[in-house]
Image (tube, rainbow, N blue to C red):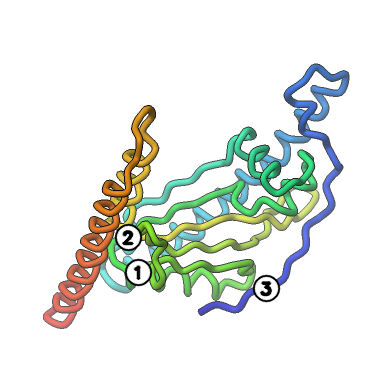
């Protein structure tokens, strides 16, 4: 659907993030370096959120309705970053974070209808300052457990006082029905002190099918309303 682009990052000082968790003479300096990198990711989230808000405003004028229901964002916690690096057998450094962790900055865009997911994704990728790193379409090809969403990893520039930096952001685009299912699935599957059985997984998969059918029916109704208007 989209053409993937190679990208390069500005080199970052090889800061050992393990020092953030231990008593170290340079602890304050290293922590400041980590906080600075996280600030860059927060700026990338703000830039991407603005892009989607602008698209939402444009499409609301064109179609007389807002395609975006909500936008949520999150910055990955340092413990989650460390766990991900350990799984990849990589050092706990800022270089390793920037080069190998693509979802430090995350945006979730919840849309009213499935068609709007692709409409927004295509509109975003036409912007010349956004480059696609990877695309995983779990709507066309749901995960075995029933999960559906469109996942994009993109790069975009942030403009600071004295430099421009290229940052990575993970974007998840999904419908209200997809988001509802994913939220409830997470609550049920990861509830503490409960053994999640195969029967429970099968029931969740059936619910995912119902969610998919709901999206198809709502899309059909939307098209009927547009034809009659």
Question: Can residue 130 be seen?
Answer: no
Residue 212 at x, y percent in the picture: 26, 65
Q: In the picture shown, does residue 79 fall above or below 170?
A: above
Quadrant of residue 174 within the rendered picture? bottom left
Residues tagged 2 and 1 counted as in contact (Cβ below 8 A):
yes
Judge depth for marks 2 and 1 and give the one in front. 2
Q: Around disc 3, counting alpha carbons within 10 Å, would you say few (fewer than 14), some (14 to 19), or many (20 or more)? A: few
Residue closest to the far left: 228
Name the foreground residue: 61 vs 140: 140
- Look at the numbered disc 2 and give the secondary structure of its residue: strand
Whichever of callouts 3 and 1 sits on the residue coming sooner in the sequence is 3
State the residue at coordinates (37%, 27%): 193
Q: Around disc 2, counting alpha carbons within 10 Å, would you say few (fewer than 14), some (14 to 19), or many (20 or more)? A: many
State the residue at coordinates (86%, 43%): 13
Residue 70 at x, y percent in the picture: 36, 51
Q: In the picture shown, does residue 183 fall above or below 7?
A: above
Residues tagged 2 and 3 counted as in contact (Cβ below 8 A):
no
- Look at the numbered disc 3 and give the secondary structure of its residue: loop
- Look at the numbered disc 1 and give the secondary structure of its residue: helix
Residue matched to label 3: 5
Classify residue 4 as left or right of residue 111: right
Name the foreground residue: 41 vs 170: 170
Label placed on residue 175: 2
Name the foreground residue: 212 vs 152: 212
Residue matched to label 1: 116
Q: In the picture shown, does residue 193 fall above or below 15?
A: above
State the residue at coordinates (65%, 61%): 155
Quadrant of residue 32 within the rendered picture? top right
Judge depth for marks 3 and 1 and give the one in front. 3
């Amino acid at each position: 659907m989209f053409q993937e682009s190679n990208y390069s990052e500005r080199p970052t000082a090889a800061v050992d993030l393990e020092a953030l968790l231990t008593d170290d003479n340079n602890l304050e300096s290293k922590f400041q370096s980590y906080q600075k990198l996280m600030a860059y990711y927060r700026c990338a989230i703000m830039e991407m959120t603005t892009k989607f808000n602008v698209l939402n405003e444009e499409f609301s004028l064109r179609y007389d309705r807002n395609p975006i229901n909500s936008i949520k964002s999150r910055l990955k916690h340092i413990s989650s970053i460390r766990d991900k690096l350990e799984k990849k057998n990589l050092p706990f450094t800022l270089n390793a974070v920037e080069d190998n962790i693509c979802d430090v900055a995350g945006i979730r865009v919840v849309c009213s209808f499935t068609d709007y997911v692709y409409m927004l994704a295509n509109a975003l990728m036409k912007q010349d300052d956004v480059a696609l790193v990877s695309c995983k379409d779990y709507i066309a090809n749901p995960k075995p457990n029933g999960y559906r969403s469109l996942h994009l990893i993109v790069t975009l520039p942030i403009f600071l006082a004295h430099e421009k930096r290229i940052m990575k952001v993970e974007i998840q685009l999904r419908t209200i029905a997809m988001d509802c299912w994913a939220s409830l699935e997470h609550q049920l599957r990861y509830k503490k002190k409960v053994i999640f059985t195969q029967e429970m997984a099968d029931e969740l998969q059936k619910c995912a099918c119902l969610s998919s059918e709901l999206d198809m029916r709502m899309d059909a109704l939307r098209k009927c309303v547009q034809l009659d208007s």
